[in-house]
Structures are given as C-alpha cells and as structure tokens.
Amino acid sequence: MSVTEIVKNSLNFPFTDTKKLLSLSGLVLIVGIVSSALVWGTIWSFSITHGKLSYLNGAMFVFESIIPLLLSFFVIGYIYRVFEGGINENGVLPDFNQWKKMFIDGAKLFILHLAYAIIPIILTIIGTFLIFDISFSSTTIINHVSVNPNDILNTLGGIFYIVAALIYIISLFFQIMAINHMISNEGDLSYGFKLRDILDKIKSIGYGKFIGAIIFATLISFIILFAFAFITSIIDVFLTFIPFIGPTIALIFTTIVITIVESYIYLFFARTCGLLYNE
Amino acid sequence: MILDIYKDSLEYSFKDELAVLKLGIISFFSFLIIPIFLFFGYNYRVIKTATLGMINGDDEVPKFDDLASMFVDGLKVFLVKLIYCIPIFILLFGTVALGSGLENYNENLSTAIIIIGMLLTIIVGVFSYLFSLIAIPRMANYNDSFKEAFNLKEIFDSLKFIGILRYIVFYAGLVIIIFVIIAVVIGIILGVFGIIGLGGMTLSVYSEGLMGLFSSIGGTIIAVGIMIFNLLLVLIINPFLSIFENRAIGLIYEGNSDLE
C-alpha cells in the first residue's frame, strides 16, 4: 500500500466498530477521571496538613503517581493489539478481553518506551544540574577569568537539553519500528532492542516513506485534535449561557468529546504504524 | 483548444447543482478547519476526474463519499501548495532582511538589493505558482503520489509541452472569466437591492414625517442585499467557480499526457 492508502485505511479503521471505539474512550475516560481525582486528593491532603509532609499526603503522592500509570497499561495494552492487527492486516478492531494479557502487553510497551527514553532522561537530568544546581561563587573566580563560569555551564546545560530532545524525537521514530518488530515476534521484549534488525526493517520500507508516513499521520492527528478542540470551545461558549448548570455541562461535554477524539487518534496512529511494518 | 476547455469546464460545473450546493456548505463551514481540507479534497477529485477524462466527454461530477480519503487528499493538496510557497517566503524574507540590514551601511546598495530581490520574488513566485498548478494534476495522474508533485523536471517538461506563454494566457483567461462571473453577480444583486435601497433613501428626503423610517428601510435593504450576496458567494458561486477552475486545470494537463 502507498502511504496515502495506509493513512486512508487507518482513518476509516476506528469507525469499523464504533462500539469498541467508544469502549476505548470509556477506558481512557476512567483513567483520566481516576488520575485527576487523585491529583485533587493529593492537593487536598496537602492542604489539610498545611503543606507539610505527612504519612497521609505521602501515601497520596505515591498513589497519585502509580495508580494512573497502572490503569493506563490497559489502554496501552489495547493499543498493542491495534498494532498487532495492523501488522497482520486484520480489518476489524480487536476485542476487549483477556484483561491480564492486555495489562502485561501494556507494561511491555511502557518498559520499551522507558528504555528508549533513558538516554534523553539522563541527559536532561545532567542538563538540569548544570543549569540550576552548580553555581560557582563568581566573586572568587571572576578576578582571574573574564567569562562568568556560570554562563558557560548554563549554555552547556541548554545544549544538553537540545541534544536530549533531538535524541528523544529520533528515538520515537525508532520505537515505532521497535514495537512493530517486538509484536511481530510474539511479543518478545528482546526483539524490541535488536537495533540492527529494526534499522534494516526501516531501510526495507524506505527511510523517506517511513518518516514521511509518520510525519503525515502526526500532522493529521494534530489537525483533527485542533479542529475538535476549536469546535468544542465554540459550542462551550454557547453552553455556558445555560443558567447554573451551563459551565458543568460544557466541562462534561468537552471532556467526553475530546476523550473520544483522543481515542480515535490513538487507534488511527497505531493502525498506521502497524500497517507500515509489512510494507 | 483553450476555448474548448473553458466551454467544457463551464458546462461541467453546471452539471450537478446539488454537488455545487454541498461543496458550498462545506466551504461555509471551513472555519471549523477540517472542512477546508474536505473542500480541497473535493477539488482534487474534480482535477483527478478531469485528468482521467477528456474534453467534452461525459464525465460525472465526483461524489461526496469516503470523507476520510477526501480529507487526506485535501491535506496533500494543501501541503503541495504550501511547499511550493516556501521559496517565495524565503526570497521575500531574505530580501527584506538583507536590504534593511544594509540600509545603514550603504543606502544605494540596499535599495538595489530590495528592487532586485522583489523582481526575483515575483518571477520565482509566478513560476512556483505555475509549477504548483501542474503539480496537482500530475499527482492525480500518477496514482496520488506525493513525490510526483515535486518532480520538477517532469513538471517543467509538461509546462513546456503545453507552452509556458500559452499556459499563462490560459490561466489569465480563467481568472478573467471568474472575475466577470463574480462581477455580473455583484451587478445583479447589488444593483437590484441598491436601487431599491437608495430609492428608499431618496424617498425619505421628500417625505419629512416618515424620513427616518424610509431611510432606515433603505439602509436595511442594502444591508440585506450585501448579506444575500455574501451567502450566495460562499454557498453557490465560490464552489461553482472552484469546480470550473479545477476542471480546467485538470483538462489542460490531460491535453499534454494524452499526446505524450
């Protein structure tokens, strides 16, 4: 298939089973509601103790970071199946069953992503240290050196940031192929790190085609998200004219619409990536 | 041949009034972002039908189905046009930056650079516009391949084959026809409403008691006329003319590939 055909197929794909699209949206919505409830809960628990750390808000803080992540593994696990369907060129949306497997698959994708992100993360940490934490007392050194050493360190820190961002972006392209490669080899995580194989696979598709397809799909995702955010914001303006309950309705409406659009984009993007594998 | 294309394109855009109206509704909602691309995508279908069909053939007006692919095609057309604009922007900004940068250093030099740069921008602009006009039918003809839209050598060959001057004349003719049609519609609608409205206003001068009433009615009639004109422009004239223009652009490209 050409890139255009892949993208067209993927755009229609979420509509092949609207019920499942809505189920995924429901899942995404639950994750969102739980995570924002926990964030508010944490803020509330800190307000009770007047900002001091205690067992309660410490525990809340841990819950707030871990539970949404664990819940989102189900969503990612479903995305995993969409990738799988794309690789095998299945025409229909995968089922919501075998939740345990779905969770484990999601965890695998998370580990893969974390592993690929580790170099950028380290670079970012170093950069942050360079910018914020080390500061020479300028008075002693400035007599001998004409340049303030803090400036040099800050610049260096900035360079670290930029390099980290570049590596991260490049690794995202790589990760897509890594995920595909892993899934097509029965989900064996080690296949996600066979860099040479992955590079060969990208080469066989063609760098231009692969990168072009990903950028094109990203662009489409942005346009769709932007358009719907714009439309809902217009509708929200009118909804807020309803007395008393208007703002609440607007909030609920926006949340639901954007969640569905978000799920649609997940499906669309994962489908595009999966279909690219066998090109 | 050019006249045949004009004639065929005009007839073609009269073929399906419902399609024109649908396209008009899409263009009416184009402030919602996605419909813009649907609009481009539909015009792309018109071009594609034209490149595959023939002059004075009985081509059907494309249908409004498979919106996803219409959207993708529209986005591609938009990107092609955008990329063809890049050289113009670079030249324009380069000229302005260089010119204003040298202003304090040597005024004559900076003026010369700005003049030369502007001339260059105009020439490059005309050519990249011509190229982009050929690029889209070419993309349609070569299996929707995005790459083919930037095959500059082949596009230049097509342009030479049609004849650069001939193409410019053809496109200028197209623009003139479009302007004339819009002018006629403006003339009719604003003429009718304007005369009634102005009549109302003049009447108000002679009838002292009802002066305010008549003059405000006259103003309202003119305002309604302008509104109707705008609505008509967006819903009917604009889509009609875009089908006409794209049909013509598609047909003149076909004239070349047939003989190749």
Image (cartoon, helix red, strand yellow):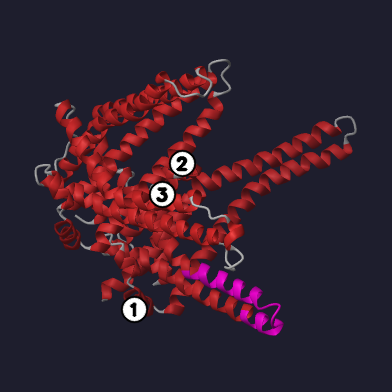
**Spot occupied by residue B136 in the image (x, y as percentages of width and height):** 36, 63
- Secondary structure found at label 2: helix
A114 within the magenta span: no
* Front residue of this view, candidates B167 and A55: A55
Chain designation of label 1: B
From what the image shows, is residue A249 above or below residue A20? above
Quarter of the image that includes the N terminus of chain A: bottom left
Q: Which residues are magenta?
A: B87-113
Q: Is residue B203 left or right of residue A186?
A: right
Q: Closer to the camera: disc 1 or disc 3?
A: 3
Which residue appears at 49% of the width and 59% of the height?
A: A153
Residue A132 seen in this snapshot: yes
* Front residue of this view, candidates A73 and A148: A148
**Spot occupied by residue B180 in the image (x, y as percentages of width and height):** 57, 60
**Spot occupied by residue B163 in the image (x, y as percentages of width and height):** 40, 79
**Spot occupied by residue B10 in the image (x, y as percentages of width and height):** 43, 58
Residue behind mark 2: B25
> What residue type is disc 3 on?
Phe
Residue behind mark 3: B37
Image quadrant of residue B242?
A: bottom left
Q: Earlier in the sequence, mark 2 or mark 3?
A: 2
Q: CA distance from mark 2 to mark 1?
A: 38 Å
Q: Earlier in the sequence, mark 2 or mark 1?
A: 2
Dot 2: few (<14), some (14–19), or many (≥20) neighbours within 10 Å?
some
Q: Closer to the camera: disc 2 or disc 1?
A: 1
Residue behind mark 1: B157
* Mark 2 touches mark 1? (CB < 8 Å): no
Do marks 2 and 3 share a chain? yes
* Front residue of this view, candidates A162 and A47: A47
Q: Earlier in the sequence, mark 1 or mark 3?
A: 3
